[in-house]
Amino acid sequence: MTLTDAAADLLAGGPVCDACLGRPFADRSFGLRNDERGRALRTTLALEADEPYEPVDPVECWVCEGYCGTFDALAEAVVETLDGVDFATYQVGTVVPPLVEENDRLLREDAGMEPDAGEPLKREVNREVGRRVGARTGAEVDFDRPDVLCIVDLSAFGPYAILEDGEAVTAHAVDRQINPAFVYGRYRKIERDIPQTEWPCRECGGSGTQLTDDGEEPCDYCGGSGYLYDTSIEETVRPHVVAAMDGREGTFHGAGREDVDARMLGTGRPFVLEVKHPHHRTPDVEALEAEINEAAAGAVEVEGLRLATHDMVERVKEHDASKRYRAAVQFDEPVSATSLDEAFAELEGTTVEQYTPQRVDHRRAELTRERTVYAIDGEPGITETMADSVETELLEPEDVDTTATIEVHGAGGLYIKELISGDDGRTEPSVAGLLDTGAEVAALDVLAVEGEDEPFERADYFKDEAADGGGESGDAEETGDGDESGDDTGDGE
Ligand SMILES: [Zn+2]
Ligand SMILES: [Zn+2]
């Protein structure tokens, strides 16, 4: 059967528009639209038969019932829906009424063709409307993860009103989805006792209320706020980013987390702020960084903010990372510098076994982990940088014999407090065990969170050039962490 025979058969059942006539042959040739295919076939048939050429307007077409004539109007409705929304990539999807889909199938069957010959109407509408949206907005189509996705529902309007009466496609026909946008950065926590994310009160479960004999009253434990702390890293960062992107809400994703009472210093900890429903996707990150830092007034600092792709979320959560710590340690008995050095020599490069610490959430599986101590060093006494920030009854900084400042570089997941204390024998070997005296971390600083094999910052996970600063290529070598099981857990336990 020749192509023109097939086309004649397709036309035998009633008037068919160019696009519907060409669509069963969508897989033939390249660089042609379906209506061009259809028009060529109709022209050829007229020439072969030497009969007058009679075009069929979509409004007369029994297959698409006019929808193939509404691509321009649909594109206009889509563009209108996206008015005021900032996007660089988009995708158009279509819901075709079942009866029209059935027509498309009947057209082929009646002509003796495969029911799915060529392509379905849905794909044609997606492409034709999408092409027009791209031409009008300058945005690029992205089938994987577009900034915006518009689904047009053909059943929400009648093509005749568009084609005959010149009406516009109703906005109800377009369902707009704005996908999240992401800002990557690193934070430093200069002050202690700030949780990474909001921490609901454990007594009232975050409700801020408690039941008494007199009825509901503000929770005694949290004072009625529902939260254990006034602020958090998330609270410090999120509102600014959400506002800058004119979004609806934001989610903070950190590369692990330090204990609430630990500071996060040095190159900071990677994070991603995910903004839902953003109307702006390209805020000035340097201005944003300055704004956050000014509002945080020195308690928290962010740096290296960059526009990132969604991949960065998984990156900060899953990327293997090592960490560097500085701990102010209190011993039960005097410890000599020599025995300290001997303990460090013993521990450096050693793989320690750590049974799930007593302080860790009991919902966590109890098991023995093996973690490597890459490097450990220290000196008797508490260095000024730690003593200044330590307010704990545990520590007597003036007592050089019974205190030490210890720096550790460990694999992700190493429980640093237990490496020092031994955790009643659950961690082996340990500083306390080797020194044969009680040892406890009185204050802890995290100095770096660095990717084990490569930096957190991967060029293809960013959407722009680096902002000023940031630890992305780093003074310290990069390592990082996704494993929160280290001393990163047990916040407030
Ligand atoms: Zn048609
Ligand atoms: Zn409470």
Image: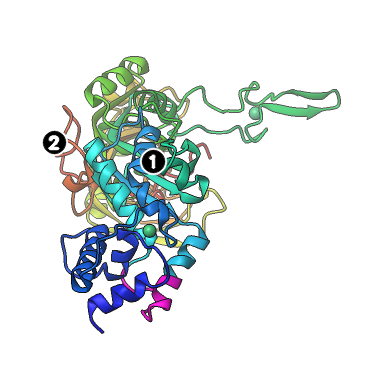
Judged by depth in the image, the label closer to the viewer, 1 or 2, is 1
Magenta-tinted stretch: 106-118
Measure how far apart labels 1 and 2 are at the Cα level. Answer: 24 Å
- In this view, the residue in front, 317 or 153, is 153
Choose top left, top right, bottom left or bottom right for residue 417: top left
- Secondary structure type for disc 2: loop
- Ranked by sequence position, the earlier of labels 1 and 2 is 1
Residue 388: image x %, image y %? Answer: 33, 19
- Secondary structure type for disc 1: strand
The answer to if 240 sits in the magenta stretch is no
What crowding class fits label 2: few (fewer than 14 Cα within 10 Å), some (14-19), or many (20 or more)? few
- In this view, the residue in front, 328 or 284, is 284
- In this view, the residue in front, 412 or 82, is 82
Residue 147: image x %, image y %? Answer: 32, 42
Q: Which residue is mark 1?
A: 253
The answer to if 107 sits in the magenta stretch is yes
